[in-house]
Amino acid sequence: MSVPKSTYRVQVRPDFDLDATAALVPYLHALGVGHLYSAPLLAATPGSPHGYDVVDPRVVNPQLGGAAALDRLAARLRAAGLGLVVDIVPNHMGLFQPAANPMWWDLLAKGRASEYADWFDVDWDAGPLIVPVLGSESLDDLRVEDGELRYYEHRFPIAEGTGAGTPQEVHDRQHYRLVYWREGNERLNYRRFFAVTELAGVRVEDPAVFAATHAEILRWVGEGIADGIRVDHPDGLRDPGGYLERLRERAPGAWLVVEKILERGEPLPPQWPVDGTTGYDALAEVCGLFIAPDRSVTDWDAEAHEQKLDVLRRLFPAELHRLARIAGSPSAEPVLSQLAANFGVYRTYLPYGREHLAEAARRTQEQRPDLAEALDALMPRLTDPADELCARFQQLTGAVMAKGVEDTAMYRWNRFVALNEVGGDPSRFGVEPDEFHEAAARRLAEWPHGMTTLSTHDTKRGEDVRARLAVLSEIPAEWAAVQAGWRAQAPLPDPSFEDLFWPTVVGAWPLEEERLHRYFEKAAREANRSTSWDAPDAAFEDAVHALVARLYSAGDLRDEVAGFAARITPFGWSNSLGQKLVQLTMPGVPDVYQGTELWENSLVDPDNRRPVDFAERLDLLAALDASAALPPVDVSGAAKLLVVSRALRLRRDRPELFSAYRPVPAVGAAERHVVAFDRGGALTVATRLPVGLAESGGWGDTELKLPAGDWVDALSGRPASAALADILATYPVALLVRG
């Protein structure tokens, strides 16, 4: 198996296609990258900016350049000594434009007689396929045109021999029913990705469907085009473990990682034949190192439970109806809803994880004793992996966690938003070095080839925004006073949203005004408190947009925001360099998300998918390599590029230095402000809690207990003594190797 030394994620898309990606290869090689890690490459909805809405898994996306462009990219990577990791989406396919998806189009035209009827997870006993696309309950705007049923820009097939009569009469003869979009969550009769009706679940548990949907991907692996696979959203599948076994059997030499979100303390199922996760667990561990610990009790669990119940009511009634029909009783719905809301993890893989189901049942009985009898009656079926009820309930709980927690509660419960991250625990303030070391040693022992990351296309905010926000955990009283003054000057009618608004502004400042407008509109609607996607509140949203506009107008408020951001930015840079070096050198395969080798102040998607100025990065890297002078830690981000390139190159060129893990302790008054570890010859040193360090007078006589030998900093080129004041004289981080 070819395990990458590192990966670099590129959002390949129609406006940055495979040939544009191939042009990056010299830069990636110079940066020290081991493998290019691409966004999905199969044919997707025309114009898709991300590729996760695959419409034809049999072909390379023609909008990206097709198979020929992929061959050119692979050849250029091989010539430079790099590999390719591809992102695949087995759980669902895109329906945004039905005519673009030949399998779905055929299904709509022929119903159960379609050769693709077994591809999609449809409840055929529930009647015609429900397509929630209408703007009202009326069919008056339907028309028949060019042998198709049309509704504005939407096109649908007409079954053979059913095209005579009025558009409404033609519609009523089809294998599908177009309905008001607001009825979709209640009436839908096919499995979908989370609550997205335009992404239909695929039955890859069927060997024939697996073979048909994976033939092209496996061709890439077999022909040496790709040597790594990232599996998107395995939790949506009926049998994730069985799917991964089949994939591993057909791609035995591929590096294989899964986008599995683990809750705190939850292990990756050890029986899965994979190399690890995509790194959200590592993200939480690393970022926590740079947050001041606080063990006060919070009400986060109650908020998360409440929002899971709410999304079950708002978004998942169709799924609950289907489960109740399988259970044989409409009264099963409240039981299943409470049980799903009480899950502390995304899902089980029964019989593995049965303890999580038992704990959810215990909580349900404690909260709702009136449901105890009905729950007891369902438990034998819910614990039987062969039972349809058990299988579909396991698929539901992950969607409930994602929508209820990630996409709702994390926009509502805003005590400290740097913690509100995918795979994060907002109630957990800070990770002590000893705890981090234990987790890193465990990672090396159990999943040494799993991915680590700090930023992805799904993170709620970029790594450097989080790093700057971590500074606020060191100055809570000052931050509370500053924020109170701003809220008094410019109040919003939602205190919880204000708790999100002001940290976001100072964490990402300065940034373009339009980006903040887009972010806050999305965040407010996701929170579902003062406005929502289904029922936007114009008055509230206007107030938010007015406040954003005020920040970009001359005046005291703008000056105060800019001044405070400037005060905490140097400490944020220290945290950024520290978390980056730790992530790049800890056990696992480090990923660098596109553009994050410089300072990166992205917010949630689509903001984090903005075009990257690779020419700027290439020029800056060339300048670093050509100059003996060390770059300062400043707004250019050159110091971060230095850290990233030197760490990646060392991992690529000297892999033997990264074969072990041993904490390196510090001794002295400032010992709590450093985290250090020896990977077997490469020794990482990073400053943590820099405000407290500065306020206490710096490193003083604090020393590292360095292993014997003459050590040199691979970042600065300077020889290093044991004194931290010496080791970290140039940068707040060091990467030591024996001279």
Image (spheres, rainbow, N blue to C red):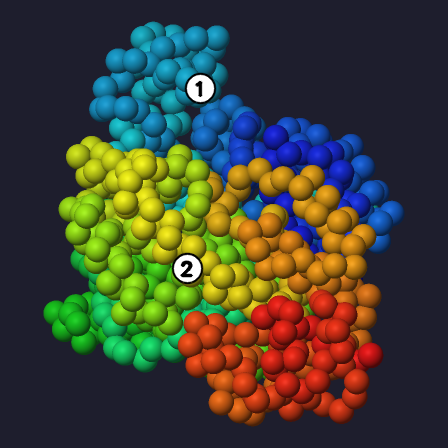
Quadrant housing residue 339: bottom left
Nearest to the observer: residue 321 or residue 671: 671
Q: Nearer the viewer, mark 1 or mark 2?
A: 2
Question: Where residue 425 sits in the image (x, y, percent)?
Answer: 38, 68
Gap between marks 1 and 2 measured at Cα:
55 Å
The N terminus is located in which quarter?
bottom right
Query: Element type at marker 1?
Result: strand
Instruction: Identify residue type, mark 1.
Output: Arg
Query: What residue is disc 1 on?
Result: 155
Q: Residue 602: x and y, percent? A: 48, 48
Q: Secondary structure at mark 2?
A: helix
Examine the rendered structure and indicate whether residue 494 appears above or below residue 95.
below
* Residue 238 in the image: above or below residue 474: above
Between 478 and 385, the one nearer to me in the picture = 478
Residue 6 seen: no
At 61% from the left and 30% from the top, the residue drawn is 15
Mark nearer the N terminus (1 vs 2): 1
Residue 402 appears left or right of 618: left
Q: Percent from the top left, x then y, of residue 424?
A: 42, 65
Residue sitting at the far left: 370
Amino acid carrying label 2: it is Arg
Task: Report the residue that reaches farthest toward the right.
Answer: 79
Image check: 458 left or right of 136?
right
> In x, y percent, where is residue 571?
48, 65
Q: How packed is label 1: few (under 14 Cα within 10 Å), some, or many (20 or more)?
A: some
Query: Which residue was labeled with disc 2?
Result: 567
Total marks placed: 2
Q: Which mark is residue 561?
A: none
